Each structure stands twice: as C-alpha cells, then as structure tokens.
Amino acid sequence: MTLLPVLILGARSDIGLAVAHRFAAAGHPIQLAARAPETLEADRADLALRHGVAVTLHTFDVLDTASHPGFVADLGTLPQIAVCAVGLMGDQAGSEADPAAAALVLRSNFEGPAAILGLLANRFEARGSGTIVGISSVAGNRGRATNYVYGSAKAGFTAWLSGLRNRLAKKGVNVLTVLPGFVATRMTAGLDLPAKLTAQPTEVAEAVFRAVTAGRSVIYVRPIWALIMTIIRNIPEPLFKRMKL
Amino acid sequence: MMLSGWGRYPRQDCRVSRPRDEAAVRAQVAKGGLIARGNGRAYGDSALSRANTVDMRGFDRMLGFDETTGQLVAESGVLLADVIRVFLPRGWFPFVTPGTKFVTLGGMIAADVHGKNHHCEGGFGGFVDWIDVMGPDGAVRRTLPGDDLFAWTVGGMGLTGVILRAAFRLRRVETGWIRQRTIPTANLADTLTAFQTHHDARYSVAWIDCLSRGADLGRSLLTLGDHADLDDLSAEQRKAPFAPPARRTLGMPLDAPGFLLNRHTVAAFNRAYYKRGLAAAGDALTGWDSYFYPLDAILGWNRIYGRRGFVQFQCALPLETSAAGLTDLLQTISATGLGSFLAVLKRLGPQGAGLSFPMEGHTLALDFPATPAALALLADLDRITLAHGGRFYLAKDSRLTPDMLRRTDPRVAAFRAMRDAAALPASFSSSQSERLYL
C-alpha cells in the first residue's frame, strides 16, 4: 500500500523535523514547507537517505496568507496528514512596548496557522479523510504576565482547533491538538528548563505519531503537564493576579 | 558540566556547547581552546577541554549516497550505529569498524580507528575520500587523501580543526551474518603462529587469558570471520538475509561496588570464558551485531568498574619484537594478579599516515580499574612497550607522560611542529593535548 504524504508546515523547527522523521520511518513521503526551503536541503537528503522515502521542499510563508491557495495547489499530492509546527515565541517585553511586535507574535502563532490549516481542512473535508495536527502550547491554557501575548495567540489557536475538530468530526477528518509543555529546541535554547518537565523533540514526535494513529483529540506530551495546567487553571483569580508566574 | 571519556577517568568540569550550524561552530573556534567531541567513546581525556568542549552530535545528517561506489557523505556527528541501521538492509556495511558502533564519524576519523581487518585492509582513514575541516580562521577546507591536512587529520585527535563532514565508502555485503571460526590456542607462541597461519582471514582477533601463567601464558581464543554469502544461509535465514535475530540489550543500572572486582573474580571470569570458548570452538554462523559489538549489548558496561572509573592500556608492538614484548607484558600483568576482563590481541597491518596508531605487528588492549596499583602497573607496561619499540593508542590513553609518548613515537614531534607552524594550539586543544604537548 502506498502511503500518502505528511506535510510539515514550519519544517525548520526541531519539533517539525522530528515529526517528519517519525512519519518517514513509518513509510510516509514527506513534504517540508518553510521560508527559504533550499536551506533545508541537508535535512531533505537525511530524511530521504535514512528512511528511503520521497521528500520534497516547498516555499511557504505563514504570514503571507494570500500565497496560501497557490502553495496548496503546488503541493502536487494532497497530504494525508498536515502538521503545523509554526511558532514564534517573541519577547514579551518587546510585545508590550511595540504593538507591531505583538501583532507579529499573534499573526505567526494564530492567524497564519489558522489560515493555512483552514484551507487544508476544506480540502480534507471534500476528500472525506485526513488528519490536521496543530502544535499549540500549554501557554494558551491561562494568560500569565511573563508571556501572555504568545499565550493568547496559542489560546486562540487551541480554541480554533477545537472548533475545527467539532466541525469535521462527522466528515472523516480528525483534528489533533498537541500541548507539548517545555521542549528542548532551538526556540528554548538558553532557557533554564527543569529536566523532568522538558521533553526532547523526538518524544514529541513519538507522541504525535501515536496520537494520530489512535485518532486522539488533545494530548499533552508529558502527562505531568496535564496536572500542572489543571492546577494553574484552578487558582482563583484574586490569588492568581498577585502571583509571579 | 562534569565530563569524562568512556573510562570515566579523569572527570573534568568542562564548558560544553552544542552547535547546530557552521556559524555556531565558527563562534566557538574564535574563542579558542576548543576540542570537538563526538559520542564520548574515547576512553580518557581526548575529547575533554575545560575551556571549550564542542559536542558535535547536533551535526548528524546523512547528505548523500552513491549506489555505484558505496560512498556515503555525512555530517561528523552521525553515529556508526545509524549508518549500519540504514545501509545494512540495503546491502552495505562499513569497511572498517571499531569494537563499538556507538561512535561518530568524526570520532572514527580523528582516532583513525581500526577493526578486526587491519592486517589485510587497513584503518578507517583508508576508506575516507574527503573531509571538510574548519580551521582556526573559521574557514572550511575540503581536504583529500595526499594533502598534508588530510594526513594529519586522520588520527589527529581533532587537533587540526573541527571535522564537519566527510565522505567514506561502504562495502557490498550479501547478508548481515558472519561466518565465524573459533580456534583455542595453548600459549602465546601458539597464538602468534595461529595469527600468521590465518593471515588471509578477513577478520581476526584473539581474546587472551591475561591471568594464565607458565606454560599456559598467552593462551587465547582466536576468532576468525568473514561476511557470509547468501549460499551460507539456511532457507529460513535467506528470507531476511540482513536481519539476524535481534539481541537483547541489558542495561548496567548502577555502578558495581569496587569489591566485586578482585583477582579472584577476574581470574574466575577468565577461566570460565576460556572454557566456554573451548566448548564453542569450531565453525558457526553469527549475527553482525554480536560478532562486531559484543559489549554494545550491555549498555553502560563501563560502570562495571565502579565509580572510580577505569583505564585502558593499548600498545602496538613491531612484528619482530611481538613475541618477546608480549611475553614480557603478560608476565608482568600475571605476576601482579591485576587481571583484565577484556584482554584483546590483534594482528596489525602496515602503518598509516600522520599520527595513525597501528604499525605492522600486534596490538594488545587491556583495561584495569583506575586504582593506584593499576596505574603503577601501567607505568611498568609503558616501559616494556618502549623497550620493545612499541607505541600507544591515544584514543585509549588518559595517563601517559609527554616524555614516554615522544620516546615511543617520533611522529609526535613532527605533529607538534606542524601545529605550531599553523598556529593551531591556541585554537584547538584538549586536556590530552595539553598533558602530552601534542
């Protein structure tokens, strides 16, 4: 049986690449989409050599929503699974000082991903099959002073994925929301993350692969994060607003 | 962070970075005092630098493969285990492999590793077509066999620059099985004669009972091998010729307490191992993994020596002095009763370029717990090696003196002169290079 491709949006990200390797190991062709995809040539070669699958590179800019229909048309084969690993952490202080910086974080984490996944979802719905995977964040579970611009964008993305799942559940299309918690990636390099709470990109990839196969809806990569976020969500607001988190 | 080699001795507090692209490596080179580190399988302080240890395992991509020549182009942090996992099912195997598959491409080049086929096919460097090396100026040079830089980089312990990428060749194999023959020998003379008799065997290695004495001194189990053809396999095995039964791996969950390792337990192990070998003597078909990498099945086996760590002694002796030198070494070891679990004897072929370790003759490798008594014994073994015109393997070393190294290997002075002329010591140095003035 020939497997259909897995599309990775934001293929330069460590999580995106790890997910690509996991699905390639299962025999899926891979479509890597990113800005300046020619710089992903080494990763393309590595994926193709290690797993013996076809790997193609595609130019993709999440912020240039006008280009998205053309991007989908140029993919050639409509993927079986679309994984959005696009993300921009931004800098909270910078976002507070400069509305344009905040807008960039909001657009990169919510507006852009929602635009491209919305297009793909419509195509999947018409076909009657497929899986949409959105890599969101536990930062979206409750706004905190230290990163609420990023967090609110992820909150929007999580809510959007939830609604999309609700809409497509009866149409043969599954939507998976992934809440990774801390992950050791280039985005978090330099941050002092607690080891027990921090997943490796390969761990995220394995969790995504299993959840897609099992048709799950929402997953935390490390179960401890479900507990942590339950506690954080349930702290009464009068107390929460005085905390430093 | 605290870092050590595979022997867990010495341990040093090193600043470690893990770059992901050339620009990040260049930034580290600019700081100086850099040594590139692969998977940490050199035993001593070859890949330690307190000031600037660069973990190259982020450079782990395979970049291209030529089906006609078997040439693989890969980044230096790619593991040999991954190369085998990817290419053996397609009918390819490395020309040269060391005794563990958990080594990086960069590490194999830097140590010019040898395998059980050195006597007939040479070291790893002989199958390398080019190397991309980042020099002290941050520029990347592609160096080819015949270049000075190439000759000094193969076996140069990472001291000529940072190995970023390389092209090396794999061999065609029909199966993942090895035809193996085990030959027990009665003593050292018998062992050396058996090596000579079977010089045309592709792979050969002897486990030597280093606690045997008197007439038994040097008794061994000589193991010969070659890649099995499809015709060697049973009909059942031929259905999946590259998939010998998977081995169970065992973890070493904790450091063994020191008292478990004494002359009685080691002697008992050596006797039992020899007896088992006698019983299993003859021809057999075995999987590639258990043949080439018996110790990889026990992940973290280095912890068997406990927290204090262990030291390896590996020397090469010229052909003409091998018998006398090995007798001297084995008698000295046996007399102290400080036996080694793993004493390995191997025939070597002609010497390679640069600082490459092997020389035409024999190599003996032993490990000992890092105790004062063992370190004193090793100093005696150094002197015996020197007296018989032998030399030492830098990838195993953690305790040689610069004087001993220079007296056994005149190439070291030329290596240092080359480093000085190219202003390399300020940019590239390891704890080993500082200790030995490389």
Image (tube, helix red, strand yellow):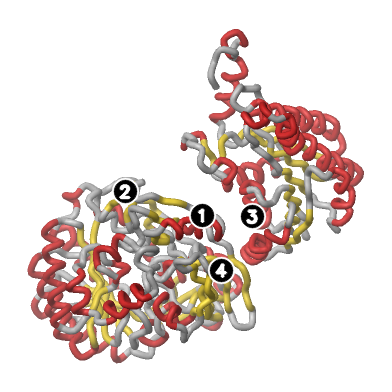
Q: Do the residues labelled 4 and 2 touch (CB within 8 Å)?
A: no
Q: In this view, does A92 lie to the left or right of B424?
A: right
Mark nearer the N terminus (4 vs 2):
2
Disc 3 element: helix
Q: Which residue corresponds to mark 1?
A: B19
**Residue at the top extreme?**
A238
Mark nearer the N terminus (2 vs 1):
2
Q: Is residue A9 left or right of residue B298?
A: right
Q: Is residue B400 left or right of residue A138?
A: left
Q: Which residue corresponds to mark 3?
A: A21
Task: Return the mark for residue A102.
Answer: none
What's the chain of the residue with tag 3?
A: A
Q: Which residue corresponds to mark 4?
A: B74
Q: Picture coordinates of residue B8 (x, y %)?
A: 29, 54
Tell me, yes or no, if residue A157 can be seen here. Answer: yes
**In the image, what residue type sits under mark 4?**
Ala
- Marks 4, 3: nearer the viewer: 4
- Residue B311, located in which quarter of the rendered image? bottom left
Q: Crowdedness of circle 2 by 10 Å Cα count: few (<14), some, many (20+)?
A: few
Residue at 51% across / 68% down in the picture? B244
